Amino acid sequence: MRVASVYDQRRPVFSFEFFPPKTEAGMPKLYETVAALNTLGPAFCSITWGAGGTTRGKSLVLASEIRRRTGLEAMAHLSCVGETREGISAILDEAAGLGIENILALRGDPPGGWGSFVPVPGGFAHADELARFIRSRGGFGIAVAGYPEGHLENRNLDIDIGHLKRKVDAGGDIVISQIFYDNRFFFDFSERCRKAGIRVPIVPGLLPPLSADGLKRFCALGGISIPEALAARIERSAGDDAAVKAVGVEWVAGMAQELLERGVPGIHFYALNQSKSILEIFRRLGPR
């Protein structure tokens, strides 16, 4: 199933992102999380690509295993980091052999998340090149990433949306956004995308905070703003992860409610392999 087709059939479409645990000891907990969130009726999940790290080789296998165990469609992430054109081709062969039909095409971050991205000789420098290569191969639905506040390396939204337009024109069927904590960024981003001629579904990505330090670290790496009101509430709860999670659930549930009322095609939740916060957000949202 090509996930883009789901957005034509129903709204809203819910989906989740998971990552491969670094050790086998983490696998049972992940499958528990997948099973719990699958009760919410998601259309698909996505599995991150640990390029340059210990989880890289597990991504495709995990995507295939989730499909086999649960029937949930699984989209595999694929980045340009450390891969030649021939390496990407071999990865796509493996994905096809495992029955994976959807790829999230990413440039990827430099090792450690800092510095400039440098492609390997014979590799791709930009995500639109990767998307075009995947499209030329055939057999895959393609998602691409969008940045409501602009990419960390380019804060000019007009230029950044021009880059996104090239990714869509190269083959992207849907856009999944980086996280944000102020819906105004997403609404402005979506309007700019439409004016730029991007017509595919633009799906907001939401992440309920799990800890104060984790939120600050994640937002710093991605150049993501934390609204003053949220920052103040998180700061008052710092050191108490349960309290931070409660604040995060309330904040993100409010964001999700407004997004759905404004007619977004769906929401992609970055689950961080945890289920409790997302289950509570859905309870607050009520039947859909």
Image: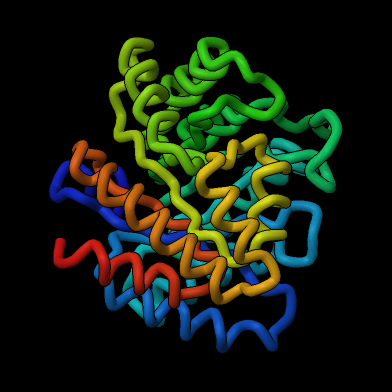
Identity of the residue drawn at 13% across and 48% down: 9
In-front residue for pair 222/71: 222
**Percent x, y for residue 91?**
63, 52
Q: Is residue 181 left or right of residue 58?
A: left
Q: Is residue 229 left or right of residue 194?
A: right
Identity of the residue drawn at 71% across and 24% down: 153
In-front residue for pair 178/78: 178
Q: Is residue 60 left or right of residue 24?
A: left
- Vertically, is 176 above or below 278? above
Q: In the picture, residue 35 is in which quadrant?
A: bottom left
Numbered label tally? 0
Applied colour scheme: rainbow
**Percent x, y for residue 143?**
44, 40
**Percent x, y for residue 34?**
43, 76
In-front residue for pair 238/49: 238
Is any part of residue 24 visible from this angle? yes
Is any part of residue 143 visible from this angle? no
**Percent x, y for residue 275?**
45, 75
Identity of the residue drawn at 50% across and 41% down: 180
Identity of the residue drawn at 64% across and 57% down: 235
The image quadrant where one finds the N terminus is bottom left
The image quadrant where one finds the C terminus is bottom left
